[in-house]
Amino acid sequence: MNKNSLILITNQGLHPVITKLKKQFGEIKVCIVTTGNVELSIRYAEFIAKKAKDILFENTDSNVFIVWSGMPIYNTVVYNVAKEVSNKEPIFLIWNRDLNQYEEWNIDARNLIFQKN
C-alpha cells in the first residue's frame, strides 16, 4: 500500500476500523461509504453505488482497497462499482484475528480463469 491508495469502508460500525488501519498503514486516505445500521433494499443499494462512484471519481488515480464490512450484498456493490470505475480489481482488506492486522487479498479472477494448470 502506498500514498496513492484509497481505502473504502463499506460500513463503519462499532469496531475501530480506521484506528486499526492507520496504525497498520500510517496516514492513508480512508472513505466511509455507510455507517451504522442500514436498511436492506434495492433503493439503498443504489444509494451505496452512487456514493461509492462519487468517492471513486474524486480519487481516480488511486489504488482501491475495500474493507469488507456490513452486509455482503453491499460489499459486492462497492466492489463492482470500484472495478468499473477504476478498470482494476480492487484489493480486499480482511481482518485476521490471529495476526491482529489486516491482510491484503488480491484476487485476480481473470488471471485465475485463464491461467494454464
Image: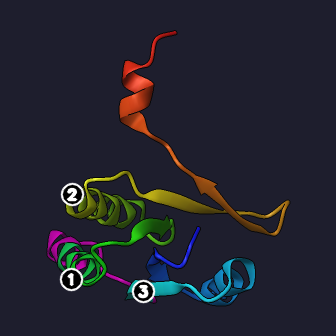
Say if 33 sits above or below 80 in the image.
below
* Relative image position of residue 1 (x, y in whole percent): 59, 67
Say if 21 sits above or below 76 in the image.
below
Nearer to us of marks 1 and 3 is 1
How far, Cα to Cα, is label 1 from label 3?
12 Å
Q: Write the residue at 16% across / 69% down.
A: 42
Disc 2 marks which residue? Answer: 84
Q: Are marks 1 and 2 in contact (CB under 8 Å)?
A: no
Question: In the rendered image, which quarter is residue 112 located in?
Answer: top left
Q: Is residue 69 visible?
A: yes
Disc 1 marks which residue? Answer: 54
Give the label on residue 32, or none.
3
Q: In the image, 51: left or right of 111?
A: left
* Relative image position of residue 51 (x, y in whole percent): 23, 82
Mark positioned earlier in the residue sequence (1 or 3): 3
Q: Are marks 3 and 2 in contact (CB under 8 Å)?
A: no
Question: In the rendered image, which quarter is residue 15 located in?
Answer: bottom right
